[in-house]
Image: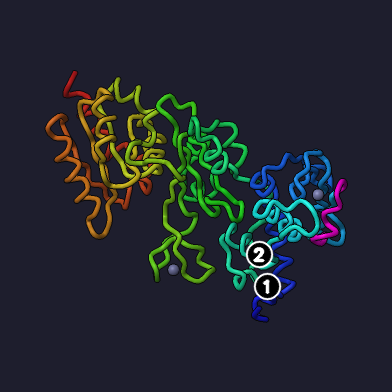
Amino acid sequence: MKKTSHFRYKDQSKLNQLTNIVVENIEDLYEYFEAEYHKGQKVYFSNCFIHGGDNKSALNLYYDADYRVHFKCRTHGCEKHFGTSLLSMIRGALSNVKYGWKNPGDKTVSFNETIDFLLNKYKIDFGQIKGESLNVGNHEFCKVVNALSKNKLSGTIDKEFYRKRVEIPSKYFLNRGYTIEVLDDYDVGNCKTYGKEFFNRAVVPIYDDDGDMIVGFTARSIFNQCKECKSYHDPNKQCYHFPKWRHSKGFQKEKSLYNFWKAKDHILESGVIVLVESPGNVWRLEEAGIHNSVALFGTVLNAPQKQLIDESGALSVIIIMDNDENEAGQKAAKKIKEQCEKSYRVYTLDINKQDVGEMNTNEITEDIRPWINKAKEIYK
Ligand SMILES: [Zn+2]
Ligand SMILES: [Zn+2]
């Protein structure tokens, strides 16, 4: 065996920081190991998923201990074989998952493998840990993504369940000038849990046509675009790939129109549908009292989305794409116009600002509202 493999993760201060990250996300790990747990004042109680017992208070994790986080298995003393540290607890649990560990002498995973597992889970580099003040300060757990994948049968998730797991209203969008009311109304919250799929993103749930159940999420980076790499990563770190928007696994944006659940009655009533690129555009229009807009999650009108429009009762389509430097928005608008002009009266609006999200209510009322009124009047 190479000596180096023994010492791959020898830096104790980094291991301590990794332990902190694990403590912050411990409920997620209980779920990963399918343990039944509950949280006490200083102790987490669960069945021992190291030796595989079902006594619900056998495994005690002292997460708030004075000197350091440690654990005890009350029924089998599993800590005697692995050590009492939290990382040892994870090693024991992984040994059970991977090799069916039950008793001393059974095969175990290595310490290095355990650390690899955790680094991979939290998408961090061991070298990156030191000296970083990791933003793991709050105990909010956004387990929504896990819950969504667990609930595969219906593929939906309850609104209240979701709302408890993010910070609503999203600070990021508040900062961009959206109202508390509109962000609350659309359940837009920041995910602050390190290691989660949507960490450092403002999460936007997408509802089914009735607006009852969440069918997916889209989430915007809370950072601005990096001038060097054009990605939307944390500006205090070296460049890494962090796209502006990220969608939850399994969510098919091509088949969905954002805000359709709220807009559909207004579309039917007015005969007008407004197409924009992203949720932020929709909220701005909502703030200005325009309730018949939907977002494409981009610049392409896909066939299933067109189908939704065809079934909506709309007679006119108003297209407002972003006003990008490279005219991508204008090209997109032209394409969508071609797709729609056989069946609809189509209006393509050019705006002065970069996108509708940058406009204020007065500007929307002056520049956009008249076109909607005009489109409505034609059929009266
Ligand atoms: Zn045990
Ligand atoms: Zn960069």
**Image spot of residue 10 (x, y percent):** 71, 75
**Residue 366: % across, % down:** 29, 38
Disc 1 beta carbon < 8 A from ligand 1? no
Q: Magenta part of the protein: which range?
A: 74-84
Which quarter of the frame holds ligand 2? Answer: bottom left
- Give the answer, above or below, for where 211 lies relative to 297: above
Mark 2 crowdedness (10 Å alpha carbons): few <14, some 14-19, many ≥20: many
Query: In the rendered structure, are the residues bearing label 2 and label 1 in contact, judged by CB atoms less than 8 Å apart?
Result: yes
**Numbered circle sitting on residue 115:** 2
Asked which secondary structure carries label 2, the reply is helix
Q: Residue 319: where, in percent of width, then height? A: 24, 40
For marks 2 and 1, the one nearer the N-term is 1
Whether 83 is among the magenta residues is: yes
Location of residue 8 (image quadrant): bottom right
> Is 81 rendered above or below residue 205?
below
| Amino acid on which the number 2 mark rests in the picture | Ile
Q: Hey, what amino acid is under mark 1? A: Tyr
- Where does label 1 land, which residue? 9
Q: Quadrant of the N terminus?
A: bottom right
Q: Which mark is residue 201?
A: none
